[in-house]
Image (cartoon, rainbow, N blue to C red):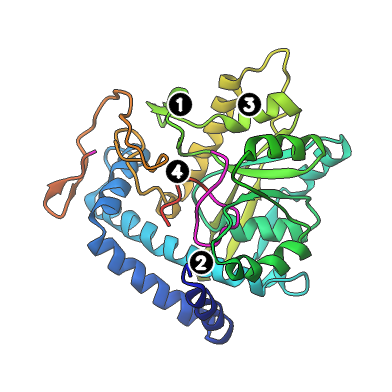
Amino acid sequence: MEHYYLYRVGIWLVARLPLWLVYFVAGTLGEVNFVFSRRSRRGIYANLNHVLPPETSWFRRWRDARLAFRNFAYSIVDFFRIPLMDRSNMHRFVRECRGLEYLQGAMDAGKGGIYVTVHMGSWELGGAYLGMRGIPLTVVALPHKDQRIDQIFVRSRQEGSMEVVPVGGALAKLEDALRRGRFTALLADRDVTGKGPVLPFFGEPCHMPDGHAKLALRTGAWLYPARVYRRRNWELCIDIRPPIIPDPAVDTEESLTLRCISYLEEFIRSNPQQWFSFYDLWHATELPIAGEQRQRPPARRRLFVRDAGRPADATGKTDDPAGKTADPADER
């Protein structure tokens, strides 16, 4: 039954226990996962090696890797809190939302919008929040075999006027939604198709997703680099940057993707300890792509930091614990 009662228990706990206690327990479990999840730990170390300056100390690398596991655990707590959010209390879930005024430009122009974001913070809760702020949002979700799990999130989606489309034929449905002036969100820091272009990411060649650029050129939708990140005391903030307005006369899929990558790199550099990327994006051969393995393109290999005495070697949305806004490469 896909752990229906686990969802219910999780929501019951976050609704009744002090929030600081829930986050404390989640963070502790994240620490345990850091110790025992060897593959994910090595993936975090490998990716941080591209983000952090070469002179970064081993302690800073260890600290940021450990905190990435803690922050991922916090995002699961946020996920269980989504059904508790409504218009009357949403200010308690997101403390600050910067750049909301940029979205009005696309709506006034009759254009759709695409949030281009990274695996950071709680993008699912951020999407629900923006929906409740009046942004017409369309997301891709995997239906659960146990429909009771889907029903848990129906109220939050309805209150936020969120439109949910299934994974099958999602690209065409998103294109239609964007042409109708709606918004969607795509995680753009991990290619899960194996067919994305090889572009510089933190200065080294890496397969990158370009679905957001394709949709923008096809529909005229504006691209909004955005992130959801966490401040002290577990407070969530949304940061939306000025739009990248596609011009089919001069822009290409590659040029738009590169412009978005520059923002993604800025987001990750500013909070590397909040980036949940558990696979080595530059060298991994086992990214979760439809159950298949694939070989990454050759890239200059660096000497990775040592992990537990060993060298740490080397978009659309999908599968996550709730069947809500989801990403095919999500570790959950």
* Nearer mark to the viewer, of 3 and 1: 1
The residue identified by callout 1 is 195
Q: Mark 2 to mark 3: distance in Å?
A: 37 Å
- Amino acid of disc 4: Arg
SS category of the residue bearing label 4: helix
Q: Nearer the viewer, mark 1 or mark 2?
A: 1
Examine the image and state in which quarter residue 229 appears.
Answer: bottom right
Q: Residues in magenta?
A: 314-326
Identify the residue at image location x=78%, y=51%: 135
Give the CA distance from mark 3 to mark 4.
Answer: 26 Å
Tell whether 18 sits left or right of 127. Answer: left
Comparing marks 2 and 3, which lies closer to the viewer? 3
Residue 252 % position (x, y): 62, 17
Q: Position of residue 241 (x, y in %)?
A: 66, 41
Residue, x 32% and y 54% (percent of image)?
A: 65
Tell which circle, 2 or 4, labels the residue nearer the N-terminal end.
2
Q: Is residue 30 above or below residue 115?
A: below
Q: How many marks?
A: 4
- Residue 269 — which label? 4
Name the image quarter holding residue 169: top right
Q: Secondary structure at mark 3?
A: helix
Instruction: Say whether disc 1 or disc 4 marks the residue closer to the N-terminus.
Output: 1
Residue furthest to the left in view is: 309
Question: Cβ–Cβ below 8 Å for labels 1 and 2?
Answer: no
Q: Is residue 318 magenta?
A: yes
